[in-house]
Image (cartoon, helix red, strand yellow):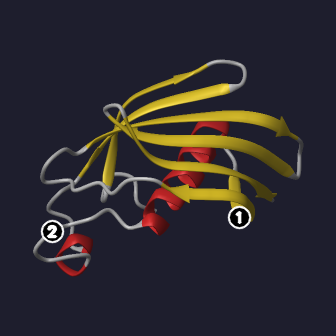
Amino acid sequence: MLVDNLYRVVSNQKDAAVIRVHLEVNASHEIFKGHFPEVPVLPGVCMVQCIKELIEESLLVKTQIDKGDMIKFLSMLNPVESNSIQAEISIKEKTETRIVFQATLKNEDRFLLKYSGSLVVLN
């Protein structure tokens, strides 16, 4: 898990169908020494994993990524320049076995990620 290591949750709001989370990325995390030493960039795979973890934490389930119907990486995040991220996740469908969602990650007014997909709920 990346939470409390690569990022920490600053605030979390949840209503019936929307999860809103403010995160801070740990700019001194080991991952940035290799991605990339001169200009650190938050890897896209970490953004995708972050969404998965936020859904799991908010809905109290364990999941596995099922589909990424649309995953668009729109901007890079250099955590040394700005380490704040706002996540917004809309739960479109939730059953005992599957969660369908749309999510965005933003840094200030700049979109970092737009992601629509589904997760399989594990027992």
Name the residue beneath numbered marker 1.
64
Left or right of 12: which side holds 120?
right
33 to 45, vertically: above or below: below
Question: Percent x, y for residue 103?
Answer: 60, 42
Q: How packed is label 1: few (under 14 Cα within 10 Å), some, or many (20 or more)?
A: few
Compute the Cα span from label 1 to label 2. Answer: 31 Å
Determine which quarter of the picture holds residue 44.
Answer: bottom left
Residue shown at the point (22%, 71%) measured from the top left:
32
Question: Percent x, y for residue 6?
Answer: 31, 59
* Quadrant (top left/top right/bottom left/bottom right) for the C terminus: bottom right
- Amino acid on which disc 2 is placed: Val
- Amino acid on which disc 1 is placed: Gln
Instruction: Work out whether residue 109 or residue 97 is closer to the camera in this orientation and state it.
Output: 109
Determine which quarter of the picture holds residue 8.
Answer: top left
Disc tally is 2
Which residue appears farthest toward the bottom when viewing the image?
A: 34
Q: How packed is label 2: few (under 14 Cα within 10 Å), some, or many (20 or more)?
A: some
Name the residue beneath numbered marker 2.
39
36 to 65, vertically: above or below: below
Which type of secondary structure does the marked residue at label 1 adopt? strand
Left or right of 123: which side holds 107?
left
Left or right of 104: which side holds 29?
left
